[in-house]
Amino acid sequence: MTPTAKIIDGVALSKQLREDVAKRTAALKARGVTPGLAVVLVGENQASQVYVRNKVKACSDAGLHSVLEKYEAAMTEAELLARVDALNNDPSIHGILVQLPLPAHIDAHKVIEAISPAKDVDGFHVASAGALMVGQPGFWPCTPYGCMKMLESIGYDLRGKHAVVIGRSNIVGKPMALMLLQKNATVTVCHSATADLKAMTLQADVIVAAVGKRNVLTADMVKPGTVVLDVGMNRDDAGKLCGDVDFAGVSAVASHITPVPGGVGPMTITMLLVNTIEAAEREAGVHP
C-alpha cells in the first residue's frame, strides 16, 4: 500500500513555536523578568534523566533560566515537599516540574498537589485539571496540548467531527478528550475495557492513540481520510522506537499522521516551554 497520509512534522512545528517562546522571553527580559523553570529529579531512572536533560537544554536554547535539582532515590517525601515549598516561594522560578515516576516511598499525588497551581507548568495539579474541565484559564498538560497545536497547524476544524481517544490516563487521555470537546468535537474515549475498539475507530474523523502498546491501531481500523495522532513510545522487535500505531499500514489510509519519533514527542517539551513563558507573563501582568 502506498502512503497517502501527509506527515505532521512535530520537529518543524516545535521549531516554530520555540522561536515564538524565545521572542516572548526576550520581551520579558527587556522588562527585567527572566522566566525560570525548576526541574526536580529524584533517583536514577535512565529515561527520566534523558527527558530532564532535553527539557533543561530546550529551556536554555529559548533563553529561559532553568534550574535542575537532582536528589538521591533515598530522599524522603518530607524533604521533597520542603523543596517544592521553597520553589513555590522563589520569585525567580515561574514553573516547577517534578519528573515522574518518583521512588515508591514518595506519594506522587501529594507532591504534585504541593506545587502552586500558578507554577504547575506540567498541568497535573487538580486545580489545573479542574480549570480545563470548566474551561477556565489554567495550564494544559503538555502532551495533549501539543496534539491540539498539531491539529491547528494543519488547519483542522474539529467542530462536529468525531474524535476517538484510545487511552484514559490523567496525563494524556482524559485531558485530550476535554480539549477536543472544547473545540466542539464529539468525543469517544476508548480503553482496555472497551468491547469493540475497531467499531469505534472506524467511525472516527480523528484518532489519538495514547496507550503505550504497539500496533493498537492498524489499517483495517481506520476509515479513509482520518487524522491520526500517535502519542505512544514503544520499541519494535529490532529495538527501534515506534508508536502505538502501525505506521506503514495506517499511513496508506489516513489523510494526516504523526510519526514516531519526530511527531508528538518534540511537541511535549515545546508546550512545557509555552506553559513556562505563560506562567512568567501572568506573574508579570503581561498578556501576549
Image (spheres, rainbow, N blue to C red):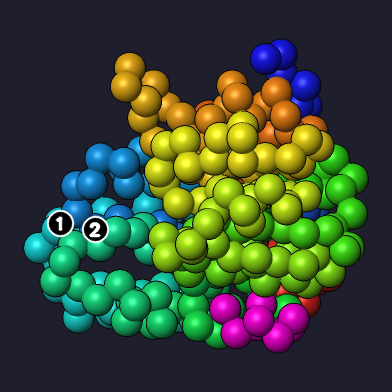
Q: Magenta stretch?
A: 129-136
What residue does disc 2 label? 42
Q: At which x and y percent is residue 119?
A: 54, 73
Secondary structure under tag 1 reads: loop
Work out how far the residue at label 2 is from the one at label 1, CA to CA, in angstroms.
6 Å
Q: What residue is drawn where x is 67% and y is 26%?
A: 251
Numbered badge on residue 251: none
**Count of marks placed on residues:** 2
Is residue 152 among the parts visible in the rendering?
A: yes
Picture coordinates of residue 194, whole percent (x, y): 49, 63
Quarter of the image containing the C terminus?
bottom right
Q: Are marks 2 and 1 in contact (CB under 8 Å)?
A: yes
Q: Residue 22 in the image: x percent, y percent?
A: 72, 45
In the rendered image, residue 210, in percent from the top left (x then y), is placed at 51, 51
Q: Amino acid at mark 2?
A: Val
The answer to which image quadrant residue 128 occupies is: bottom right
Q: Residue at x 37, y 25 (%)?
A: 236
